[in-house]
Amino acid sequence: MQQAIAILDSGVGGLTVVKEVMRQLPREKIIYFGDTARAPYGPRTPEEVCSFTEQIVDFLSQFDPKMIVIACNTATAAALEYIKGKVNVPVIGVIHPGARAAISATKTGQIGVIGTLGTIRSGAYITALKELNPGVEIVSKACPTLAPLVEQGRYETPEALELVQESLTEIRFYSLDCLILGCTHYPFLKKEIRQVMGPNVKLISSADETAREISTILYQKNCLARGNEIPIHQFFCSGDPEIFRKIALQWLGEQIELTPIVWQVANPS
Ligand code: DGL
């Protein structure tokens, strides 16, 4: 049996990474968990997000994955280092790949970052970007209304454009050449974000670069899937399976095998 890549997010946002992994690594089997019952993670404390992430990693570990991808910026900021110390397989997040993609795309060194409250408060993008190039200038802005909008399937609506306009009011007046979509839900709103930011700002999503990093790690470890077996991906979500199924079908363009999970422990909030 082929070992899978485990991918997790607070909800449907990690599907933006799943789509790229399916495109770049079509032989790889994916096991995905979207914690839709407890999304959004953005307003929660880092401790809470870390404990939710650990719980999901424990759940996914029963499938013996060959690597774990925290496809959620908020959970990456709060839990990546902790989870790395806890499991014996490679673990990656989406912040370093996103930062790398922005550094390679910027010409002027003026980079914007949008994300959840948790991600922006953590300063994780500033640290990651400055580690790569201390000379870049960064403007960041939390956009707390956007992930819930996507989670409810209300992207591609007039309301979505209004909320994006409102969220980007300040940041669009900076002279940026790149804007990092520092939340895996935001590629669902790329059209609206493009409309508001204009054609000259490159929109950076970490999905491509994260899939490339997965591919590099699996290649180096000699763990890439072989053979012609078509992988059957498995999806789990903790909230309403119907909305998850609908969004996944729209985004991935295929039906998914989805199992709803009810957490047995109390939701602390
Ligand atoms: N998709 C997540 C991220 O990349 C979090 C959205 C949320 O649950 O607030 O940060």
Image (tube, rainbow, N blue to C red):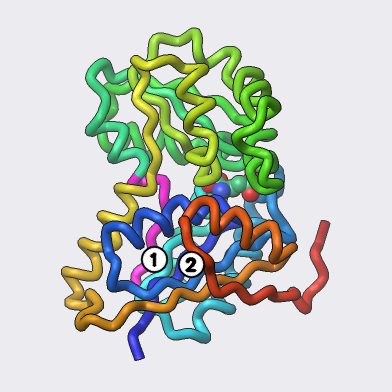
Horizontal and vertical percent for residue 216?
21, 61
Q: Residue at horizontal 27%, vertical 64%? A: 25
Q: Residue at horizontal 63%, vertical 57%? A: 246
Q: Nearer the viewer, mark 1 or mark 2?
A: 1
Residue 91 is covered by the magenta coloring: yes
Name the side, left or right, on which 160 lies relative to 31. Answer: right
Picture quarter with the N terminus? bottom left
What segment carries the magenta color? 90-97
Horizontal and vertical percent for residue 68?
42, 69
Q: CA distance from mark 1 to mark 2?
A: 7 Å
At label 2, the amino acid type is Ile
Q: Residue at horizontal 58%, vertical 78%? A: 59
Residue 203 is covered by the magenta coloring: no
Whether 179 is drawn above or below 30: the answer is above
Question: Which residue is label 2 attached to?
Answer: 83
- Helix, strand or loop at mark 2: helix
User: Which residue in the rendered view is the most extreme toward the bottom?
Assistant: 1
Residue 22 in sight here: yes
Question: Which residue is label 1 attached to?
Answer: 91
Whether 90 is drawn above or below 101: the answer is below
Whether 180 is drawn above or below 254: the answer is above
Residue 78 in sight here: no
Reading the chain from its start, which is encountered first: label 1 or label 2? 2
Horizontal and vertical percent for residue 36?
68, 59
At label 1, the amino acid type is Val
Picture quarter with the C terminus? bottom right
Decide: marks 1, 2 in contact (CB < 8 A)? yes
Quadrant of the rendered image containing residue 91:
bottom left
Label 2: few (<14), some (14–19) or many (≥20) C-alpha neighbours in 10 Å: many
